[in-house]
Amino acid sequence: MKIVIVVSDPVSGLLQYPVDLALCFLAHGHDVTVLSWTTKGQNPDLYERIQASSLNYVVEGSLRYSFSAKALLHGLAAKPPSTFELADILLTFGPLTSWQIRRYGKKHAVTLAMIAAMGHDRTSWWKPLLGAALLNQYTTHVGALCHLEIARLKHLGVKEKKVVLVHNWLDFDRLAYQTQRLASGAAVFDRLALPQQKNLIACLASFQPRKRQDLLIRAFANVADHWSDYDLVLAGGGAERLACEQLVASLGLTERVHFVGQLANDDAMSLLSVAHIVVHCSNAETFGYSMVEPLYLQKATIVTKVGIGWEMENADVAEVVPPDDLDALTAALNKVINGGDIIDLRKAKSKQFVIDNFEVNKIAQQILSLRSPA
């Protein structure tokens, strides 16, 4: 089977995940093409993985542009090279991308658009509406990454018959290898300039309003005096970082809250491997890799009920709280730090929950089955 997977921006660390899926399809005997806007500037590890495989690599220049008028204009001319064999399955990420590569599939190809974000920034009313129109016109299936997203996509105007639940996926062999290689005690603390004598509460997320690091800082301030052996670590970059640093200073927590910047994937896994507790407190999410990876590592985890939080609450593998609720987040920190049988039981079963629901081979088979519905 001929499969095309879009990797529209090969600089992002998150793009290891579509490559994981591409390599999975390849290992099962399918002809897989990775589609990108450039061959330059890739994440070195990602590019090496592509080069070391027999994945085809095709450049589609229109994919370079973000959701803008320029993207729409360049997408008008997007088309495959004359020698390109049209695909049976097109896997895209976002509504605009599904439109830009509309000519890469056969007449009756499956086009699955996985929606990483559509309307979450709440700054534009027209973009989600246009996104829904593109999905309705140029896809056969729209992947809702979790149960909470199904209703949201329908509310935005995506046709109900197109929406399917397709979780994001993880390559556990790669994660296990990374974890074993990186969890080497003092080296992690030294590299990230963290206090080795403290228990660490870690949050890995870009600094943007919906990620709500400010709420976590305030919750930590509420418990910091009582739990003096715990420090907070915030990893990520973005426009809200300065405001969060100023908030930390105003609360007198400069020595207890550590900003380690935007981390490469290896360093992110290093931080997760040594963290005692991991927190994700966003008020909007489609899935949340940073919510799932700590569970695989069997870390005590606190999340808000966004994205995959619904599934995590139902499986009782994490402490799940309402978004934007300082009192609930403070109580959750106290509960998880205090520990006990409930927390231990959650950690014990969390890894199997992730394996059962998000393993890359299982998701690959689910995607392949879209060509021949039961």
Image: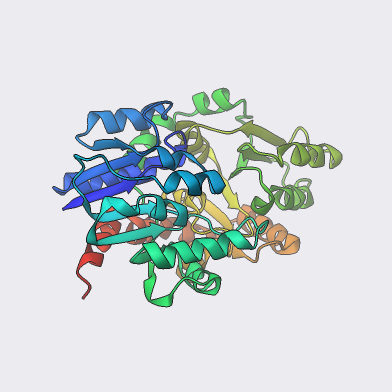
Question: In the displayed image of the protein, which residue is found farthest to the left?
Answer: 29
Whether 147 is drawn above or below 88: the answer is below
In this orientation, does residue 301 appear? yes
Q: Residue at x 24, y 29 (%)?
A: 52
Residue 145 percent location from the top left of the image = 43, 62
Image quarter of the C terminus = bottom left
**Location of residue 231 by image quarter:** top right
Residue 35 percent location from the top left of the image = 33, 41
Q: Residue at x 84, y 42 (%)?
A: 251
Q: Is 50 or 348 nearer to us in this picture?
A: 50
Residue 79 percent location from the top left of the image = 32, 45
Whether 30 is drawn above or below 16: the answer is below
Q: Is 225 or 90 nearer to us in this picture?
A: 90
In this orientation, does residue 316 appear? no
Residue 13 is left or right of residue 169, and the answer is right
**Location of residue 233 by image quarter:** top right
Residue 200 is left or right of residue 182, and the answer is right
Q: Is 207 or 103 nearer to us in this picture?
A: 103
Residue 84 is left or right of residue 272, and the answer is left
Residue 288 is left or right of residue 175, and the answer is right
Q: Residue at x 62, y 29 (%)?
A: 194
Whether 141 is drawn above or below 291: the answer is below
Q: Residue at x 49, y 65 (%)?
A: 132
Residue 196 percent location from the top left of the image = 60, 30
